[in-house]
Image (tube, rainbow, N blue to C red):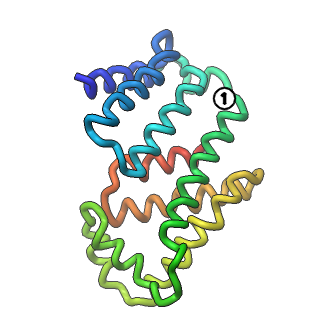
């Protein structure tokens, strides 16, 4: 019953209007109540829980029947909190990949393509690419995960560039396999 209730609360949040202010909190509480019974222990589960908690601080949406716009701008600290979440996510993944490695560990991307959850046909084909391509991809991944997140706190074009790099990485990962909502949620965080 909890997943069905969560879907209902999600629809209420998306519809907006009178139900909108409490719907994100109800969605988050529903997901949080599944934490122990289901065992939400993967990084994408934690990302969803924390992004859901931050979403409760966003202003309610206007009713779906009205013009497409936000009712009010979120507080600047809420925007900072979403950028901080994206920063911690990307630097955390970069730290896990690159701390304690050396240049001789240049096949991470190749092993990732075949070892990820449900590799796609694109991932299966990319697995057969030449080694220099994987080495170049690893350099790009290092820049996106370990350098670009710092520019999320800069202004203007720097922030937009960092967000575009992170979103492009997520599109590439999603093209090679299936991480479900993780890549989509990360792209949504880049929009903020």
Question: Against 98, is 85 above or below?
Answer: above
The answer, for residue 63, to whether it is visible in the render is no
Count up the numbered dots: 1
Question: Against 105, is 39 above or below?
Answer: above
Tell me the residue at 24%/61% (across/down): 118
Q: Residue furthest right?
A: 155
Dividing the image into 4 quarters, which one contains the C terminus? top right
Residue 23 image position (x, y, % from top left): 44, 19
Residue 16 image position (x, y, % from top left): 48, 18
Describe the element under mark 1 as helix, strand or loop.
loop
Q: Residue furthest left?
A: 1
Q: Residue furthest top?
A: 18
Tell me the residue at 49%/77% (across/down): 137
Tell me the residue at 48%/84% (across/down): 135
The answer, for residue 90, to whether it is visible in the render is yes
Q: Nearer the viewer, residue 128 or 95?
A: 95
Question: Against 56, is 166 above or below?
Answer: below
Residue 148's image quarter? Answer: bottom right
Residue 174's image quarter? Answer: bottom left
Residue 76 image position (x, y, % from top left): 72, 34
Side (left or right) of 130 relative to 95: left
Tell me the residue at 69%/59% (across/down): 150
Residue 31 image position (x, y, % from top left): 36, 31
Residue that mark 1 sits on: 74
């Amino acid at each position: 019953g909890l997943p069905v209730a969560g879907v209902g609360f999600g629809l209420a949040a998306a519809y907006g209007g009178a139900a909108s202010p409490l719907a994100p909190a109800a969605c988050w509480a529903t997901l949080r109540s599944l934490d122990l019974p289901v065992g939400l222990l993967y990084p994408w589960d934690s990302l969803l829980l924390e992004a859901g908690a931050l979403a409760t601080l966003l202003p309610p949406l206007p009713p779906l029947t009205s013009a497409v716009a936000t009712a009010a701008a979120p507080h600047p600290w809420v925007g900072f909190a979403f950028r901080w979440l994206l920063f911690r996510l990307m630097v955390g993944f970069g730290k896990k990949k690159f701390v304690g490695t050396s240049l001789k560990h240049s096949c991470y991307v190749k092993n990732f393509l075949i070892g990820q959850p449900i590799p796609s046909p694109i991932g299966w084909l990319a697995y057969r690419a030449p080694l220099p391509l994987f080495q170049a991809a690893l350099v790009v991944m290092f820049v996106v995960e370990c350098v670009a997140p710092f520019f999320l706190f800069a202004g203007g074009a720097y922030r937009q560039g960092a967000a575009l790099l992170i979103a492009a990485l997520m599109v590439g990962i999603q093209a090679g396999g299936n991480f479900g909502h993780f890549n989509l949620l990360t792209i949504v965080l880049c929009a903020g």
